[in-house]
Amino acid sequence: MPIRLLSSLDAARIQWYHFKAIIVAGMGLFTDAYDLFCIAPVMKMISHVYYHGDSINTAVLSTSYAIALLGTATGQLVFGYLGDRVGRRRVYGLCLIIMILSSFGCGFSVCTTRRSCVMVSLGFFRFILGLGIGGDYPLSATIMSEFANKRTRGAFIAAVFSMQGLGILVSSAVTMAVCVAFKRGGGGGGTEAEKEEVPAEADLAWRLILMIGALPAALTFYWRMLMPETARYTALVENNIVQAAKDMERVMSITDISDETTTEPPPPPPPLPPSYSLFSLRFLHLHGRDLFAASVNWFLVDVVFYKSNLLLSQIFSHYSDKSSSSTTENVYDAAFEVAELGAIIAACSTIPGYWFTVYFIDKIGRVKIQIMGFFFMAVVYLVAGIPYTWYWSKHEQTKTGFMVLYGLVFFFSNFGPNTTTFIIPAELFPARFRSTCHGISGAAGKLGAIVGTVGFLWATKNKEEDGDDLNRMRAAFLILAGVCIAGIFVTYFFTRETMGRSLEENEHEHEQVNNDQSEDELEIVDMQSSASTLLHTQ
């Protein structure tokens, strides 16, 4: 019976293979974060190379951001569905190949003189890159959840997601290193005339930055191909318990299943899973609330997370000691400053937030951490937004305090809903729908990211007066606070806790409740029938 095999997985001790799986599964998230955070300095460089230092047109800029996010959402839906239909392992390798090839493709974007041609080519390869990254989201979370034991499952999935923090840090470090190397190599001197003239090598620099992000993912391809199919998929979806046990024994030390599956005759096949299909009335009755909560929460947190990243550069330029109008900006210096800011935020706020979640997720619980994260993010935005026009923006001595305050957004985003929304969908749904439902939830999140990114770019399109700019910033903070408050309510009323229970217990909780309710209703009907019969006999 599969129950014994799954129980052995839930009770398995922590082993080397768990950590190997974290690294291999996390490389897709690494590439995602690398691309997300290197594209800002890359666009700075492109603006100097092809737009002669002018700001890139809002329509072009918003399209370049949105197209990668749209590709990610599409990949989450398509590859999430395929992960449940043809197997996690088979689709997993395909996603990694797409990421590697498209990352190199971004660097080889055609044309070196016509900016329209470059932007179209870059947009195409970023959409393909998004497809691979999107597919990696549901597969990485699902594979890690199905390999892990129930005591530390949350920490393992959070550790996979924390590879984003490493991707952010590496993208900033690579960008700064490339900029310094090209600048010292003769590109962009110190005089005003040399700064105004963009060296030809700058067109190579931004391409190199994009291509380097593919290398760590490429190095893990071999180990990803060696990963077996998860035992839960093989046993529960393919109904092959013997193969599931053999796969697990090949990579992990699992006790008490060898005798059952190899020395004795094969047991009769397990009962087929319930016959309801995805989005049937039965599915919506059992899992519709979970899918709604996971999707809406991911949508809300990505609106906040992606808009906060765009606000960051604007806030930095406002509070920076350097005056952008007093000196001509060198192409490498412009990209270096953006990357440097990303590295500071990653090291001081983002990465600590990820690892706080890894440590506390199986002690506090998913729901409490998610509510806490939304709450403190809302508090930070209210404290920043309400007095922004008459306090934060007017007093020079508040500069450092405001930057520290804003950094807390990224800490509580990752020690909060940005991580938990990745974990929860991988634990709630049946094995045959798990990857699909995670993909649906993630795609809803990427739609939120498009809303936050494109909405911000168009809202700040025309900056005519400084006062208007301050009012826009204040309004943005207050809107983001409202989004976080909405996340608190959705989490509290609709999200179920999954800590400390097996995946099968989470899956069947609603079915058990419904069965208990049905039995109670039958008992009531029987009692009413007995009472009616007794009255008639009297």
Image (cartoon, rainbow, N blue to C red):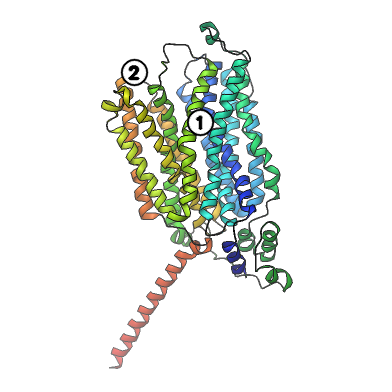
Give the mark nearer the N terminus: 2 vs 1. 1
User: Considering only vertical position in the picture, is 106 above or below 380?
Assistant: above
Image coordinates of residue 462 in percent, x first then y, are 37, 21
* Category of crowding for the residue at label 1, using alpha-carbon neighbours closer than 10 angstroms: few (below 14), some (14–19), many (at least 20): many
Q: CA distance from mark 2 to mark 1?
A: 31 Å
Q: Amino acid at mark 1?
A: Ala
Image coordinates of residue 159 in percent, x first then y, are 54, 47
Q: Amino acid at mark 2?
A: Glu
Q: Nearer the viewer, mark 2 or mark 1?
A: 1
* Category of crowding for the residue at label 2, using alpha-carbon neighbours closer than 10 angstroms: few (below 14), some (14–19), many (at least 20): few
Name the residue that disc number 2 marks.
464
The one of 522 and 403 positioned closer to us in this rendering: 403
Image coordinates of residue 135 in percent, x first then y, are 58, 44
Residue 181 lies in quadrant: top right
**Residue 343 badge:** 1
Dot 1: what SS? helix
Residue located at (54% from left, 40% from top): 164
Quarter of the N terminus within the rendering? bottom right
Image coordinates of residue 279 in percent, x first then y, are 49, 56
Q: Is residue 87 visible?
A: no
User: Considering only vertical position in the picture, is 138 above or below 479?
Assistant: below
The one of 116 and 311 positioned closer to us in this rendering: 311
233 left or right, relative to 344: right
